[in-house]
């Protein structure tokens, strides 16, 4: 791809690289990107999103090794999209991410300890997609609930989204059960994935129901 095209479409190319590469970036920018719905909202990155006991910090190239360690863990990556396993590829991906205006990729921190990752991407109108949700072994048992509540608080209170969408592999039963308990509605499926949506009411209801994990909102320091 010419550097001019890359310059223009770097963020959409970044997004495409995030999922399984079944089409080339050229195909994406020429045939799919032009038809993306207009008016999608921006996903602003933040330096820090502070919750009750955890905080998120913006992921950088320096986190490539940690991210790769999670994404190449055989058990954890079982239902995640493929990564090459090469540090240089992960570093290049993070450089690409730093330029993208439609993603926020966070390292989940428990005090000084990085315990996982979570990412917001693919804004479609007032709905955002999220994923890359991984927590390392030895995490506190409240980390899953608190990190999800922090993500929804950031997306709705601070970015203005009113809905969410995401997909989960059918085999990742524990995780889709988690989302269903949280109020996600299954809207479609393929042979391998379930697709979910949450509207504003469902998000607010769960934030209230699970307020013992995160009361109120998060404090945000934007980049
Ligand atoms: C997805 C992932 C981050 C979820 O984290 P997790 O810690 O495994 O989440 P759990 O479902 O075990 O929930 C953690 C705790 O919260 C509790 N919990 C979950 N939902 C709850 C609810 N609705 N109410 C109260 N407690 C709840 C669980 O009981 C569990 O408590 P325990 O540790 O005392 O048993 C983690 O499993 C992971 O890294 N998986 C690999 C990557 C992956 O597949 N990511 C998802 C891609 S879509």
Image (cartoon, rainbow, N blue to C red):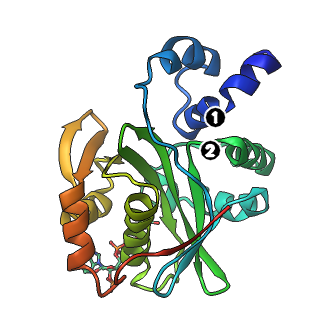
The quarter of the rendered structure image containing the C terminus is bottom right
Total marks shown come to 2
Is the CB of the residue bearing disc 1 within 8 angstroms of ligand 1?
A: no
51 over 179 or under it: above or below: below
Residue at image point 28% right, 47% down = 170
Residue 84 placement: quadrant: top right
> Dot 1, crowdedness within 10 Å: few (<14), some or many (≥20)?
some
Viewer-side residue, 83 vs 36: 36
- Residue 60 is situated, as x and y percent measured from the top left of the image, at 73, 58
Residue 35 placement: quadrant: top left
Side of 17 where 89 appears, left or right: right
Give the label on residue 83, or none.
2
The quarter of the rendered structure image containing the N terminus is top right
Viewer-side residue, 134 vs 56: 56
For ligand 1, the image quadrant comes to bottom left
Query: Looking at the image, is mark 2 or mark 1 earlier in the sequence?
Result: 1
- Residue 43 shows up from this direction: yes
- Residue 206 is situated, as x and y percent measured from the top left of the image, at 23, 70
Residue at image point 37% right, 82% down = 214
Disc 1 designates what residue?
11
Q: How far apart are marks 2 and 1 (CA)?
A: 19 Å
149 over 87 or under it: above or below: below
> Dot 2, crowdedness within 10 Å: few (<14), some or many (≥20)?
some
Viewer-side residue, 62 vs 201: 201
Residue at image point 27% right, 65% down = 178
Side of 36 where 7 appears, left or right: right
194 over 218 or under it: above or below: above
Residue 8 placement: quadrant: top right
Give the label on residue 180, or none.
none
Is the CB of the residue bearing disc 2 within 8 angstroms of ligand 1?
A: no
Check disc 2 and report its element: helix, strand or loop: loop
Check disc 1 and report its element: helix, strand or loop: helix
């Amino acid at each position: 791809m010419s550097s001019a095209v890359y310059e223009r479409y770097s963020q959409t190319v970044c997004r495409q690289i995030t999922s399984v590469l079944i089409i080339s970036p050229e195909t994406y920018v020429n045939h799919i990107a032009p038809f993306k719905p207009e008016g999608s909202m921006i996903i602003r990155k933040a330096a820090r999103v502070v919750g009750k006991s955890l905080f998120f910090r913006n992921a950088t190239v320096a986190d490539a090794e940690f991210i790769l360690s999670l994404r190449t863990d055989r058990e954890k990556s079982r239902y995640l999209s493929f990564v090459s396993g090469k540090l240089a590829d992960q570093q290049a991906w993070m450089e690409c991410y730093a330029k993208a205006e439609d993603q926020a990729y966070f390292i989940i921190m428990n005090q000084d300890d990085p315990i996982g990752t979570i990412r917001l991407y693919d804004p479609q109108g007032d709905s955002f997609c999220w994923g890359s949700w991984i927590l390392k072994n030895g995490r506190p048992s409240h980390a899953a609930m608190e990190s999800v509540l922090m993500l929804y608080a950031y997306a709705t209170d601070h970015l203005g989204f009113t809905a969410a969408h995401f997909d989960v592999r059918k085999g990742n039963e524990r995780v889709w059960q988690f989302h269903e308990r949280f109020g996600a509605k299954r809207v479609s499926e393929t042979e391998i994935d379930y697709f979910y949506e949450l509207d504003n009411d469902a998000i607010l209801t769960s934030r209230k129901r699970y307020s013992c994990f995160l009361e109120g909102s998060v404090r945000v320091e934007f980049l």
